[in-house]
Image: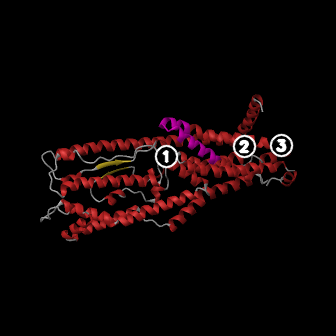
Amino acid sequence: MNGNSLATWLAFEWRLVVRARLSLAALLLLLLLSAVSVWSGLQETARQRATIARLAGLQAQDAAVATQRNATGGDAGNAAYYTYHHTWDAPQDAAFLALGLRDVAPYALRIRALGLQAQLYEGESFNPEVALPGRFDFAFVLIYLSPLFVIALLHDLVSGERQSGRLRMLAAMPDGARLWRRRVALRFALLLGCLALPLLAGALWSGLGAGATVLVLAVSASYLAFWIGVSLLVGARGCGSVTNATVLMGTWAVLTLVLPTLANVALTRAIPVHQGVDLMLAQRQTVHGAWEVPREDTMRRFYDGHPQWRNSAPLTPGFQWKWYYAFHQLGDESVAGQVAHYRAGLLARQDWTDRLGWLMPGVGVQAVLHRLANTDLPAQLAYQQRIASFHQALRHFYYGYLFTGKPYGPAEAARQPIFTPASGRVALPWQAAGVVCLVASLMLGAGVRSLRRLSRPARLAGGGQAR
């Protein structure tokens, strides 16, 4: 096909799409939803960055107050109790695409040198009424809404020609199979364009790298291709437009809503994991109970686990900070096994969820986007691990004064550990994206092959009546 004939064909096919008001309205609506989702994601990531910056300012104010309090000589235990330390997990450039767990899990946390577990899960959002709505982001539009627009454009691609009486004529054309492929390709390009244009604008605005942008475009194209393949398989069966639309809507509901929900329920029952708030309550019960335990018993248990502080001076009558921090650490250590089981259970669920992406493309696409955006479960657990490492450094810093009796003043306060956020970009999940592309290619190939049957006389004769 030369350039003139290609332009003529494109103009003709475009007029057909424009004449179908449903198709034109669907394309415009998809473009609008994509633009709104990208804008919403960018606004949310900007809000999170502003919150992190504001908390950094509060941290500077707290540090100034602590320095003034210790200007004439201070107490390390008092400073450790009243000084908050700012930790944060800034959104990646791709976070606007899929906000993931950043919508329900803390991305900034101020901690003290007290028990860690009670602080880690204090802000956990486990209320389903809070967590269910989520955010309107690009991942939502792509995974849940874009298949509906594919159905709107392709459910009557074949049945419409059959009902108008043109199908036999089209099948008799020498390049009839090529005609169907061109029509499918045009609709695919229009749908992808409605998703890609806002995506590219958002990528430029956020500074998203070229590799990450290409990966998102590839995954988006693959997901559309999967649903186009499904639509072609259903459309080539010889049923009417209403029947095709009904079957496709049912398929969409099963693949994007029913099966993922059932799989999630099965994983929850197969790999039971308590909520983080349970760890917080268990740790607090141990800490509160320590007030009733003889102080010597508490210190003996602490020194058994931390012999480097055994040479500390014996406890004197009255309250002592080192005893207070000792039973807070013992409270954390009392739930260490539960914490390890909690993290292992969550990661096991995540591994099985990734495997489900082989069977459910929506789950696979969601996993790819969340990994790219660094908003998935492993990212949240990694942030918690960075907090735990920082908290351990704080404890070691203050213990150097609490258990040795060394003076603590402004010069010592200036040497407090400072939280270091994650550095570097997230590795692009090409392997997981490849799985999505493979599944989509197989489904699209099956759908395109089903179009070849339209040229068979027996098939045309058997499918002449629209249902």
> In this picture, which residue range is highlighted in magenta?
199-224
With respect to residue 352, does 85 lie above or below? above
Q: Amino acid at mark 2?
A: Val
User: Left or right: where does residue 328 sit relative to residue 366?
Assistant: left
Q: Amino acid at mark 1?
A: Ala
Which residue matches tag 1?
A: 427
Residue 209, magenta (yes or no): yes
Identify the image quadrant of residue 353: bottom right
With respect to residue 234, does 217 lie above or below? above
Q: Amino acid at mark 3?
A: Leu
For the residues marked 1 and 2, what is the alpha-carbon distance in whole angstroms? 34 Å
Sequence order check, earlier mark of 2 and 3: 3
For the residue carrying disc 1, how many other residues have a C-alpha within 10 Å: few (<14), some (14-19), or many (20+)? few
Q: Is residue 33 visible?
A: no
For the residue carrying disc 3, how many other residues have a C-alpha within 10 Å: few (<14), some (14-19), or many (20+)? some
Q: Residue at x 71, y 52 (%)?
A: 245
Identify the image quadrant of residue 325: bottom left
Element marked by disc 2: helix
For the residues marked 1 and 3, what is the alpha-carbon distance in whole angstroms? 48 Å
Which residue matches tag 2?
A: 184
Query: Which one is in front, 69 or 415?
Result: 415
Q: Is there a contact, CB below 8 Å, between mark 1 and mark 2?
A: no
Which residue matches tag 3?
A: 170
Sequence order check, earlier mark of 1 and 3: 3
